[in-house]
Image (cartoon, rainbow, N blue to C red):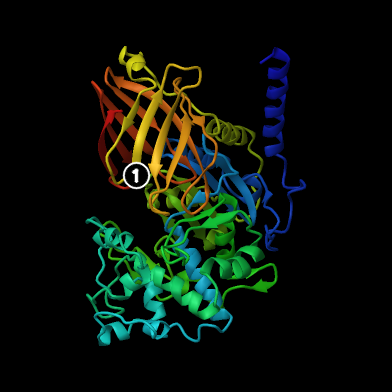
Amino acid sequence: MSGKNSSILAMAFRLFVCLAAVPFASAYAQDINKPTWPTQGWLTSTPEEQGMDSSALAKLVAYGGSHSFDSLLVVRHGKIVTEAYYAPYTADIPHNIFSSTKAVTGTVLGITYKDGLLDRLDHPVLDFFADRRIAHVDERKKDITVQNLLDMTSGLDWDQGFEGGKQQSMYDLYRSSNWIQFILDRPMAHRPGEVFNYNNGNVDLLSAVITRLTGKLAEDYAREKLFTPLGIVNWHWDRDPQGLTKTEGILYLLPRDMAKIGYLYLHHGEWDGQRLLPPGWADVLEHPLVNMGASHDPNQSYSNLFWVFPNKRVYMANGKNGQLIVVFPDQDVVAVTTARKQLQLETFIDAMSAAVKSDTTLPPNHDAAAQLANAIKNAAIEKPTSVGPTPEIASEISGKTYKFPDNALGLKSFTLDLIGPHPQFEVEISLGSPAGALVRYSQPIGLDGLYRKGEPKLSDPGVGHIIAAKGAWFDDHTFVIDAPILGFGEQQRFILSFGGKKLNLRRTVAVGEGDESSIDGEQE
């Protein structure tokens, strides 16, 4: 970069910092008691203008950098006061929100209730499946209500490892060709309402209930009644093997649109003069709460598919690996995170609450504004990781194709090119549907400690996935590839161990305690 261009960038950065400290009489100034509606786009503000501390928010941005965040977004008084995106993720990539999807599903179900399609929340669930033959029907199963599904108190026998365990029910569900039938056929372990048991099956049943009530897929009803009024246009929602919306998870949203869901709740289910939710539905802290029985927090509760922290006056949509929509109703704050590993929820809640200093504007703080601007800028710049020396084996295995027997990953072949002008790996993968279909793609790989992004690849449901990859030699026979799918919310790694003409490929995913697959291949 030329000295002239560097000077221009420096001036622009200083100008940004100065603008960040403009007094409350600026163009941002509005009556904080009058809601602003981000249907067409969010307004922005400095934290101090909205009574928040820029230095505290800068520390939160830095915290995100050390805890595998993809994004951090903070809204107060209807304006974005902090927005950070962590390289290589960028703001324009819809993010998998995992089980935060459940709260969106509860919202959609609430709309059916407001619209009069669902007559009452204590409606027996089996009424919606009268045309099915269901196993293990007893008086307890007949008593399951829609509210039980919303509160995870259905009583169905289900192992999802809420506090450890095999998650056996989830493995069995994924092997089933008809998810709704599998869930309905589960035996009962408790009477409905007796015990909280985190269960994706409850929420999948709500998908079928919504479709019975509306005659539409849950995603189509959500588009009409929720996403369109909120101005959410860039999203994707996966479907199950029967073509129903997977309402327990795998909804992709932009972080700014995740914040709109929280903002709807912050405003009691109303949006720009229109009531979207039944009166009281969005006042989660006022609901009868179900204690989750969490060993680490005896107060942690649940209501209508939201996690509730009543002692902290906070509730959230909570998805695996740090996909959060956190609502602080007493402080008029919505905070959003997307990430690639779990974070300490209480730590985040406390840090966010502590950043709120006043209900009204604070004096400008130029040093704190510069600190926050630097933290946001730093998050967006990728930092190279160490690479180490290249062993002799690199040239021996480069360009060789390894074939694999049938395996859980569906991997048929793998080729690693480290010598050519454009380092890459190429894979051939067997698709589950249609049976026997194969897909082949190549992925550029950085050998300098920096990621290389590939072209968007269509996954099974059709969402465009962008993979970023970089690799380094761990030792003379082991090559490690970091290859996150941007916006998917997982940090996957391939560990390649070479020996003669054989290759052992291990795939690890940092999910909770981690997940790992290992397969052996050989040169063709």
Q: Position of residue 46 (x, y in %)?
A: 65, 44
Q: Position of residue 505 (x, y in %)?
A: 29, 33
Q: Position of residue 137 (x, y in %)?
A: 26, 83
Point out the image quarter for the C terminus.
top left
The one of 274 and 333 positioned closer to us in this rendering = 274
The one of 389 and 303 positioned closer to us in this rendering = 389
Q: Is residue 281 visible?
A: no
Q: Position of residue 344 (x, y in %)?
A: 37, 48
Relative to 400, say whether 466 is above or below: below
Residue under the image location 66 percent in, 16 percent down = 1
Question: With 106 as the anchor, is 183 left or right in this view?
Answer: left
Relative to 244, say whether 250 is above or below: above
Residue under the image location 52 percent in, 53 percent down = 252
Dot 1: what SS? loop
The disc labelled 1 sits on which kind of residue? Gly
User: Which residue is identified by label 1?
Assistant: 410
Give the class, few, some or many, for how many residues have Cα within 10 Å of label 1's Cα (few <14, many ≥20).
some
Circle count? 1
The one of 308 and 239 positioned closer to us in this rendering = 239
The image quadrant of residue 516 is: top left
